[in-house]
Image (cartoon, rainbow, N blue to C red):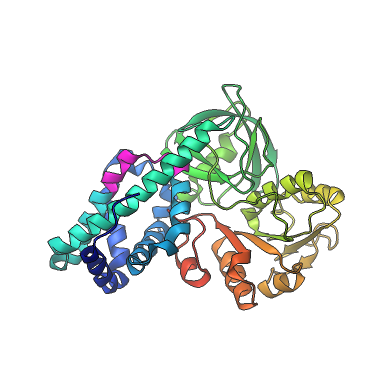
Amino acid sequence: MPKPLSASTIALIKATVPALETHGLAITRRMYERMFQNEAIRDLFNQSHHGETGSQPKALAGAVLAYARNIDNLGVLGGAVERIAQKHVALNILPEHYPFVAEALLGAIGDVLGDAATEEILAAWGEAYWFLAELLIGREAAIYRELAAQRGGWNGWRDFRIERVQDESTIIRSFTLVPVDGGPVLRHKPGQYLGFALDLPGIGKLRRNYSISSAPDDRAYRITVKREASPGVPAGQASTWLHDHGVPGTVLSVAAPAGDFFLDPAEARPLVLASGGVGLTPLMSMLETLSVAAPQHPVLWAHGTLDGSTHAMGKQVRALSARMPNLRSQVFYAAPRAEDRVGQDHDVAGLISAAWLATQAPDGAVFFLCGPKPFLRAMVGGLLRQGVEAERIRYEFFGPADELLDEAGPACLAA
């Protein structure tokens, strides 16, 4: 454990809260500008979160502000530390990377706040940064040890070969991955993701995370990826390349499974697995796991998509329904086509609502939610307003959670 923060540092950090409320986003944007001048550090990050939307600087600004506000009660941030550590492990972040972040953060505070960033303020933030950094370094070291010690586990990057490619819809495709070394793979927790280090011709180095969509086994992983229709924009570069060039035999560098959004197969309470679009991928891993480990478990599967052309894995869910007598599946199409048949392709025309989900859920159910920001904002906030306890709501967001933090509670992926 790091040395406790001094009383003077706590007081100085608390005193900077008003400045962070006003200038926090400017500070984090400047921090990334400074940090990304180092190409080796820049390549550690998912650049799609630093483009036009600036979602990662927003997420970090919210995290820094939360840290400052709770600097005298850091126990409330324990969940955030775990999420960040898991994300760092998927990116293969190491202790030697932390000084670069410290230099960039303190430099950015000085750049933005000017004379208000006194030596005392910068020293306090330096102490506060390294307190958190040492917590993360310690937790990450423990995760790395745990991963390496398990059968099929590894640290760093391991080469996997695409064994099979399967179209799931017009925009979503699955890739089955097996290790090039022929060894076993670590059995992931259903809901976790894999980190990828891609070096793409004409594009460069990219880091991405993709959820595992299959049940755990010792041989392979399956990821299910949506082609993002953003030519020339970082958000679509990796998925477009995978769809266009990811064929059987393609080799990818993969980090071990990570993430704190997962299902314990021993969970005794009923479950609601609700998704929007490609957000169904970690929930498919959960559902496939339950079909083997607990086929009698009460489950409500609720999935929303545009129409039949974008509906992924519908056949798989119907096949699982035949083996799971207490599985109820409800599929929503926002804009059904003429050929989309009610009762066969989908069940409801329209969008999933939190009120519907709350009333249809089995009593005492635990809700697992995954999807794009508008979906999660509506579901998480709506369920809380419907009286569902926060402890029963768990969610995953593909990307940094920024304003979602303010409306829905703790972040799902933030780092």
| Closest to the observer, 129 or 3 | 3
Using the image, determine if residue 238 lies above or below residue 404.
Answer: above
For this rendering, which residue is in front, 22 or 219? 219
Would you say residue 91 is visible in this rendering?
no
In x, y percent, where is residue 367?
A: 66, 63
Q: Is residue 200 left or right of residue 397?
A: left
The answer to whether residue 312 is visible is: yes
Identify which residue, 185 or 281, lies in the foreground: 185
Query: So how many labels did they put on this image?
Result: 0
- Which image quarter: residue 26? bottom left
Residue under the point 59% across and 40% down: 243
Which residue is rendered at x = 48% and y = 50% of the image?
A: 235
Task: Work out whether 364 lies above or below 83.
Answer: below
Asked if residue 260 lies in the magenta stretch, the reply is no
| Residue sitting at x 74%, y 68% | 361
Furthest toward the top, the residue is 181
- In the image, taking residue 143 as reference, residue 376 lies left or right, namely right
State yes or no: residue 96 in magenta: yes
Q: Position of residue 39 (x, y in %)?
A: 30, 40
Q: Residue 217's x, y, as percent?
A: 68, 35
Pick the residue in front: 98 or 346: 98
The majority secondary structure of the magenta stretch comes to: helix
Q: Left or right: where does residue 185 sit relative to residue 289?
A: left
**Magenta segment, which residues?**
89-101
Give the residue displayed 42% in from the left and 40% down from the top.
Answer: 141
